[in-house]
Image: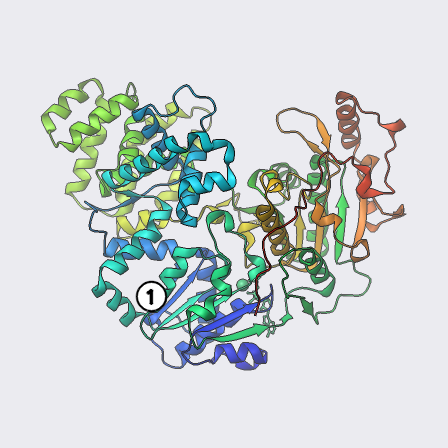
Amino acid sequence: MPDLSLLNSAQYQAVTAGNNPLLVIAGAGSGKTRTIVYRLAYLAERGVDPYSILLLTFTKKAAQEMLHRAASLLGSDLMGVQGGTFHAFSYALLRQFPPSWAKSNLSILDGADCTAIIGHCKDEKKIGKGDRSFPKNATVHGLISKARNKELPLEEILRRESQHLLPHAEALCELETLYHAYRREHNVLDYDDLLFELEAGLKENPALLKRMHERFRHVMVDEYQDTNMVQARLVRLLTGGDTAVMAVGDDAQSIYAFRGANVQNILEFPKLFPCCEIVRLEENYRSVQPILDIANAVLENAPVGYQKHLFSKRGCEENTVSVQVVRPFSDITQARIAARMIDGLLHTEQGADIAVLFRAGYQSYHLEIELNKLGIGFKKYGGVKYTEASHIKDVLSYLRLLLNPMDLPAFERMAGLCKGIGAKTARKLFGLAMQEDKEALRKACKKYPDFWADLQLLMEMRKNSVSPEKMLRAVIDQYQPRMELLYPDDWPRRQQGLEELAGIASSYADLAVFMADLSLENPDEAEDGDDSRQKVVLSTVHSAKGLEWKHVFILDLVEDRFPSRHAMVSAEDYEEERRLLYVACTRAKDSLRLFVPQNILQRGQGFEERAVPSPFIKEIPPRLYEEVIEQYGGVLVKQGLQKSPLQTMKPDINIFDSFKNAMAESGEETAGGQRETDSVFCAAKPKSANPAVKLGYCRHKVF
Ligand code: ATP
Ligand code: MG
């Protein structure tokens, strides 16, 4: 029985509410997720069948964590609850109830497949040929996906966000049509299709909808502020009967507008669901007040008036500094300083709980090297997805073809592994395979015995149904000699990866389910560098959503990095970066370190350039943090030139040298080896004006 006395009164009200629509809207760390977890346990304890509960959120990890926590409150398993991401839920239903146009099992395309298909369509129709101003394939796919998610014509997206591409509007719209036709023809879905196809299925098939209404008596959605329009409509459709709906979120944490998330969904929830009960949670239980003061200051200047002022009763230990702004010489020394601070924390606190957050995956590369040098294990969320590694994609292409023989991207990939087969030949062979003319295919494959052997293997496996693990092992055996040729330098490491994959497959009985789980692994959840010594989490801010750590470091708080360069030109994107920083700061429980490097090493150019501190940091009143500045020799000194406790760091001659060299290379004076440290935020010459954007859009209502 969950102990409801551990809830405050507003949480208690939400947990024990009846079956009317329920909206919990509240600031970060106020216990929204805890409220869902307790409600899950409460409902199960009151006899609601777990099978009739649907729990939707944005990462698999978050859903699993919630179910796990609810089960431990109950003291028994919550078997049967359907929990996961919108995309995974959609794919599971689409496998059971495929769209009418589906010819066999549908496969799912990843980003690289989509980009390759765009390239294929472009070549076929000679679109943009020889025109250097024509956008890259990945950009085209990004625009098509954005138009889809925002449910706007592609031309409108160009008009709003990429006016320089308007001259290509007609060609881009043609590509959009071709890309759509290709997916239908080859029985494949991209991520966006999953949601729209499920919506279409539910609308077209009243019997299916009725079944869903009969099954799901409770639908709960966490992080509702990040739903896009089709996700909100899915929630509406699934709760069309007398199903109870509960949505939980924080409008100030909306960080997926770039993927079409619409914050109006949460604001208009009460209009869409009449008789809605609204619960507001006021108190933050996660962070000490100085950290919340920073988060409040970040939101304060938002033109959209968030009626939020986070407060906490959590006390700080005496003589501890909760928020520090750290100003390293450069992003390189930032990595060294952060690594040593982490090392220090790990030595002074047992099992210190630390995360380093950044805007984009590449920003942690230097830190990863420094942590490795110190022998500190880490786990990385975000960045390149495990299943996007080419050797993994290679072996998975065989399995994709087993499920869906019409999957041309998989066929091309598999064929490409064999000597002498280029894209053109692959397509010709695919044509023959589709005609099921075995003799013609065998003849055409005479020159490519490896490929013929691959096809034989697939046919063999199709005939004899064996477990996914056995299939995978057979494919790996076939692939091994090719891998050794393709990756002569590091095939043993890749082999290990394949071994791991076979290990994962061993827990599946059904190939379709195994492939679905793999292809739906959220790119933001991909984990890398995982090892048993793991102590520290490195994560993009997007992947850190909903999570918390005792100590949080945020890197690269300078213009063009955070806010990102793209966001500096659009008012809406700029405000999304502000909310992203709010999300990042509110992950911290006890301490927050904001890194503002004074120089940034220009990627690929080898010299450092002065950096402009992030406008969001400049907006925070300096009384809210302690500031430490890196001096020559890697020594950190408190603003005002007092010695800081962090000064115990060892001098590092290399930092000094690399800095001097970089300055010499860039032709700048180092003023006799001294640099200004008094007026920190003026030390760097502004190289671009803060766009701080006169925002024309109106304040939204917060009830
Ligand atoms: P976010 O907006 O970041 O998703 P949230 O509102 O979902 O945050 P939770 O993650 O549920 O917040 O809770 C934040 C922290 O506060 C957790 O460690 C949780 O256990 C704790 N907490 C929440 N409510 C209470 C409470 N009533 N008493 C004690 N601790 C609480
Ligand atoms: Mg939460």
Is 121 situated left or right of 349 in this image? left
How many badges with numbers are in the image?
1
Give the residue pinned by disc 1: 238
Is 547 situated left or right of 215 in this image? right
**Element type at mark 1:** helix
Where residue 185 appears, x then y in whole percent? 23, 38
Q: Is residue 339 visible?
A: yes
Where residue 223 appears, x then y in whole percent? 50, 61
Where residue 563 appears, x then y in whole percent? 63, 44
Looking at the image, which residue is at 78% across and 57% down?
A: 624
Colouring rule applied to residues: rainbow
Give the crowd class for mark 1: few <14, some 14-19, many >=20 residues within 10 Å: many
Looking at the image, residue 448 lies above or below residue 73: above
Looking at the image, which residue is at 44% across and 73% down?
A: 40
Looking at the image, which residue is at 30% across and 23% down?
A: 423
Q: Is residue 385 visible?
A: no
Residue type for callout 1:
Leu
Instruction: Tell me which corner region of the image, top left, top right, bottom left or bottom right, holds residue 366.
Output: top right
Mark 1 vs ligand 2: CB under 8 Å?
no
Instruction: Tell me which corner region of the image, top left, top right, bottom left or bottom right, holds residue 595.
Output: top right
Q: Which image quarter holds the C terminus? A: bottom right
Is 627 situated left or right of 582 in this image? right
Looking at the image, residue 411 lies above or below residue 665: below
Is 551 situated left or right of 442 in this image? right
Where residue 347 appears, x then y in whole percent? 71, 52
Q: Quadrant of ligand 2?
A: bottom right
Looking at the image, which residue is at 52% across and 67% down?
A: 33
